[in-house]
Image: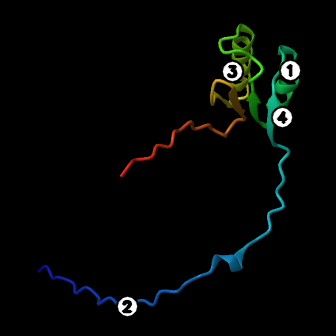
Amino acid sequence: MFFKKKKPEKKEEEKVFIDLNDYRTQSNVQSDAHVKIIEVTRSSDLKPVTDMAYRGNILVLDFSRFADGDDEKKAMARHLLKVAIDINGAFTEASERLMILSPSGLHIDKCRITHKEK
């Protein structure tokens, strides 16, 4: 009534190496977005920084001219966070002196590389 089907014997398939370098295509897609490294010196710098963020640029902001815990620096960071929320982007503090604002669709992962001693 029930018959077991014989499994077909597998043949050794010859592996073929394909060099993908032969299939390269030139991409003519260009973007107006750039990575901008900006030294922020005063709160009036926020207007051009905000404009650059709305144009879809990735901004690396250097706040080294400000002291740690400076109220003006904190106010600017709050403003930039609101800009990131408005453009559906990401905003993070990379260090006490560096902040990063990215456009929509580009997430920021902050990670630390650790080395194990043998």
Give me the residue at 40% from left, 47% from top.
116
Residue at the spot of label 2? 12
- Amino acid type at image mark 2: Glu
Please, which residue is most extreme toward the front here? 118
Q: Amino acid at mark 3?
A: Leu
**Dividing the picture into quarters, in which one does residue 73 lie?**
top right
Dot 1 amino acid type: Asp
Residue under label 4, please give it. 55
| Mark 3 closeness class: few <14, some 14–19, many ≥20 residues within 10 Å | some
Query: Does residue 38 sit above or below 35 in this rendering?
Result: above
Q: CA distance from mark 2 to mark 3?
A: 59 Å
- On the picture, is 75 further left or further right than 12? right
**Which residue is at 84% across, 31% downward?**
52
Q: CA distance from mark 1 to mark 2?
A: 67 Å
In 3D space, how far apart are the residues under numbered discs 1 and 4 (Cα atoms)?
16 Å
Label 3, label 1: how many angstroms apart (C-alpha)? Answer: 15 Å
Q: Earlier in the sequence, mark 3 or mark 1?
A: 1
| Distance Cα–Cα, label 2 vs label 4 | 56 Å
Helix or strand or loop: what does disc 1 sit on?
A: helix
Residue 54 image offset from top left, x and y in percent: 81, 30
Q: Nearer the viewer, mark 4 or mark 3?
A: 3
Residue drawn 29% across the image and 88% down it: 8
- Sequence-first disc among 2 and 3: 2
Rendering coords of residue 70 (x, y %) = 70, 10
Q: Position of residue 69 (x, y in %)?
A: 65, 12
Pick the residue in front: 104 or 107.
Answer: 107
Q: Which residue is mark 1?
A: 45
